[in-house]
Image (cartoon, rainbow, N blue to C red):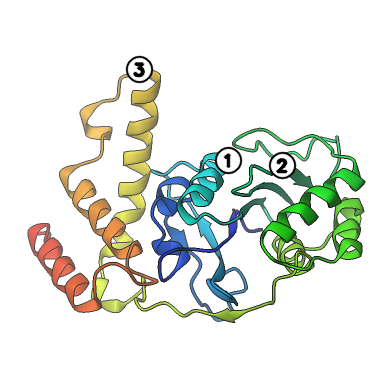
Amino acid sequence: MGWFGTLLLAKPTTATLPSQPRVRETFGSYFATPGPLGNKVGLYDLGQGWQRVGVIPFATEQLRLSAGVDDLVAATAAPALAAYVSNSACAHLEGRTPAGHNFSLHLPNTEEPCGFEHVEGMPGRVDPDLGVDGLRTWAVEASRTPSTEALAAIITSDEDDLPVMQDVVLALFAALGFTSGTEILPVIDPDDPAFDDYQRVIRMADIRAAREKYMASRGWPLDDDEKATAEDHDYLRFRDLLWSSVYGGGATRDELVAQHGQLAARWKKQ
């Protein structure tokens, strides 16, 4: 199975991009963390204040791609770019700058349907020259020196020529003039054994709460026994605290362990 998620490229005003205000509200809270196969879509320091990170929304969260990029630019007074990758097969890019330059791009750059329902619709094909100009303008405003040839090669490649799409997006970042960077490691392990029952409870809590939210948005009834429980909501609040802390800017590990201990004691099965 391929990767679904957004690769963000921005210049945060906070210590890390995940702790930048409104990032979690518009892009999601599940940030990529190191695993046995590496973490190419994790949090990276690209130098001169720039960072990139991969993020996925939980079921109870809603991706707002364009709004998220607009918020980042307004908050950081610097250009921002977000690329939502669908199943490692295609990507929807949104870029903005403080000067008002903006662009939307789909990779592969084609009029053919990609087979995925993009949250804000699939951008139509752009003329390759205009696409390169748009990306180059963004890069220059970001004080980068882009490679016109590399950008053109990416935009003009068809589906058969493009490898795993998150790799293509990272290659695009490089073509815009950004280094591969240095990985910033988490300060909190979301899989810490100290949170032993967290994963067991949160999966179903997330599903129940998301279903309840969806049904309410449609005005459809839902039986009480299908709604998220008080326990679900308690664990969802803990999840939000945990993921606001994984890359710093939230609670400490000791504080999280204490919070989890209180939570587990409250809902201990008899």
The disc label shown at residue 104, or none: 2
**Which mark is in front, 3 or 2?**
2
Q: Earlier in the sequence, mark 2 or mark 1?
A: 1
User: Picture coordinates of residue 127 (x, y %)?
Assistant: 90, 40
User: Picture coordinates of residue 242 (x, y %)?
Assistant: 30, 64
- From what the image shows, is residue 156 above or below residue 217? below
Residue located 68% across and 77% down the image:
180
Q: Quadrant of the N terminus?
A: bottom right
Is residue 179 visible in the rendered image? The answer is yes
User: Picture coordinates of residue 155 (x, y %)?
Assistant: 86, 52
Amino acid type shown at disc 3: Gly
What residue is pinned by disc 3?
219
14 horizontally vs 253: left or right:
right
Is the Cβ of the residue at disc 3 closer than 8 Å to that at disc 2? Answer: no
Q: Considering the numbered disc 2 on the image, is that residue within a helix, a strand or a loop? A: strand
Which quadrant would residue 145 be assigned to in this image?
Answer: bottom right
Q: Earlier in the sequence, mark 3 or mark 2?
A: 2
Amino acid type shown at disc 1: Ser
- From what the image shows, is residue 15 above or below residue 105? below
Is the Cβ of the residue at disc 2 closer than 8 Å to that at disc 1? Answer: yes
Spatial distance from mark 2 to mark 1, Cα to Cα? Answer: 9 Å
